[in-house]
Amino acid sequence: MYLEKTYPAVKGKIIHKSILDMDAPFEGAFTVVGNFPYNISSQILFKVLEWKEQVPVMIGMFQKEVALRIVSKPGSKVYGILSVLVQAFYDVDYLFDVPPESFTPPPKVVSGMIRLKRRTETVPMESEKRLFTLVKAAFNQRRKMLRNSLKSLFDEEFLQDKLFDKRAEQLTIDQFAALTFQMR
């Protein structure tokens, strides 16, 4: 294997498994660093969220559009499930672009490097499970007002609040987290 021949110190330390099919590879804290396969990069982020208590930092290369989605803010057209769920637990920074010419063969897309640093304090929420359920439901029908896309999660009376006149991409992470306390 190339890595073991080039870097003998890694011999016996390389894990030959898909990140999507494994439990946390180490006990205690570890950093995730990678040039992630673009077709499963979102799934990799959800895996890192599962391991967030052990992953204080993640540095990764993603397709630029995905990287921008992860770091986007409320009101942006690309603000969505990944933005909210990752930023609820991590501070995110877009570091730099990586042009196609950096690779052999060059891909047809620009890549982007991002860094996630686990937040020392997360926003108060009823539970992570509720937050995930709420955010996925809200963005599942992102063009609808929240009142319509979230009617199965809240009492009819509570849905009359003006907040539910908005669309999912208009809510902040703090607002999503606060709503978890009001869910059925």
Image (cartoon, rainbow, N blue to C red):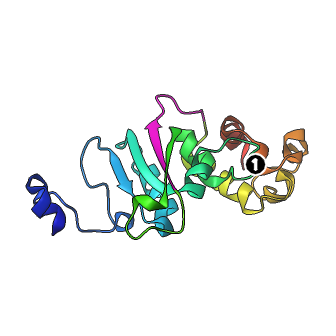
Kindly identify the amino acid type of the residue bearing the numbered disc 1. Answer: Glu
Against 115, is 81 above or below?
A: below
Residue at 91% x, 44% y is 160
The one nearer the camera, 20 or 161, is 20
Q: Evaluate whether residue 132 shows in this view.
A: no
Depth check, front residue: 52 or 180 = 52
For numbered disc 1, what is the local secondary structure?
Answer: helix
Rendered residue at 39%/49% (across/down): 51
Q: Which quadrant does the N terminus fall into? A: bottom left
Name the residue furthest front. Answer: 101
Judge left or right: residue 134 versus residue 37: right
Q: For residue 181, what is the image quadrant?
A: top right
Q: Can residue 47 be seen in this view?
A: yes
Residue marked by disc 1: 169
The spot of residue 39 in percent (x, y) is 50, 69
Q: 60 and 96: which one is in front?
A: 96
Number of marks in picture: 1
What residue is at 13 percent from the left and 59 percent from the top?
Answer: 6
Residue under the point 19% across and 60% down: 14
Q: In this view, does 28 lie to the left or right of 161?
A: left
Quadrant in the rendering for residue 16: bottom left
* Magenta extent: 111-124
Position of residue 34 measured from the top left corner of the image (x, y, whole percent): 36, 54
Residue neighbourhood size for the residue with mark 1, other residues' Cα within 10 Å, grouped as few (<14), some (14–19), many (≥20) = many
Residue 129 belongs to the span the image colors magenta: no
x, y (%) of residue 75? 77, 43
Examine the rendered structure and indicate whether residue 110 appears above or below residue 155: below
Nearest the camera: 25 or 153?
25
